[in-house]
């Protein structure tokens, strides 16, 4: 099962593609239109190419206290329902979920991440907590932080663990 925004094409290779960052309406496309990147000087066709990238997501939730056993069971069910979860840490009144998401851009990755808790609340019987934090970073930034010795530590051990 591949995660990502509907219509996004899978990306070949192991490194994120180089993309230009800009804010022009032409680069973004009109509201409701899919965003595309066009090869410049690539020789050949002028067909736009949609590009997916990997984004490291850290979602923090918090709320009223809940029994630890129920929180753990709910997070394990979420990991089963959403197999791309790397690790979850939890306590009586908060949890942190970390995983990789495939999306075209940061906005798409953040939108999917912000829906995760609510969309799985009933099926996984998650506590009625609210999202209190979200970090979305690209793969290059994640690996740079790890190499420099700061930022989120690699998600080891993978799974659901208490804080």
Image (cartoon, rainbow, N blue to C red):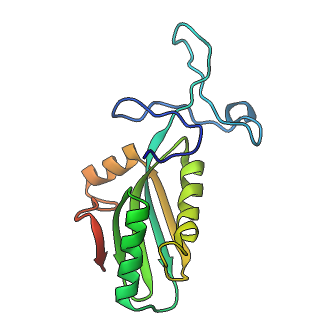
* Along the viewing direction, whichever of 3 and 30 lies nearer the viewer: 3
Q: Which residue lies furthest to the top in this view?
A: 44
Q: Residue furthest front?
A: 123
Residue 139 pos. (x, y %): 39, 45
- What residue appears at the point 55 percent right and 48 percent down from the top-left corner? 106
- From the viewer's perspective, is residue 115 above or below residue 132? above
- From the viewer's perspective, is residue 93 above or below residue 8? below
- What residue appears at the point 47 percent right and 73 percent down from the top-left corner? 124
The total number of labels drawn is 0
* Along the viewing direction, whichever of 17 and 45 lies nearer the viewer: 45
Residue 54 pos. (x, y %): 43, 44
Residue 154 pos. (x, y %): 27, 59
Residue 157 pos. (x, y %): 22, 65
> What quarter of the picture does the C terminus occupy?
bottom left
- From the viewer's perspective, is residue 68 above or below residue 26? below
Q: Which residue lies furthest to the left in this view?
A: 157
- What residue appears at the point 75 percent right and 42 percent down from the top-left corner? 32
- What residue appears at the point 43 percent right and 63 percent down from the top-left corner? 81
* Along the viewing direction, whichever of 59 and 140 lies nearer the viewer: 59
- From the viewer's perspective, is residue 82 above or below residue 162? above
């Amino acid at each position: 099962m591949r995660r990502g925004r509907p219509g996004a094409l899978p990306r070949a290779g192991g490194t994120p593609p180089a993309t230009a960052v800009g804010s022009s309406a032409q680069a973004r496309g009109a509201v409701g239109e899919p965003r595309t990147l066009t090869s410049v000087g690539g020789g050949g066709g002028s067909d736009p190419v949609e590009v997916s990238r990997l984004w490291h997501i850290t979602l923090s939730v918090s709320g009223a206290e809940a029994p630890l056993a129920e929180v753990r069971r709910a997070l394990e069910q979420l990991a089963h329902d959403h197999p791309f979860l790397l690790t979850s840490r939890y306590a009586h009144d908060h949890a942190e979920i970390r995983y990789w998401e495939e999306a075209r851009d940061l906005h798409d990755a953040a939108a999917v991440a912000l829906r995760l808790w609510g969309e799985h609340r009933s099926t996984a019987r998650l506590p009625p907590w609210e999202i209190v934090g979200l970090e979305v970073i690209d793969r290059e930034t994640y690996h740079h932080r790890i190499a420099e010795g700061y930022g989120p530590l690699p998600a080891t051990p993978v799974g659901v663990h208490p804080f």
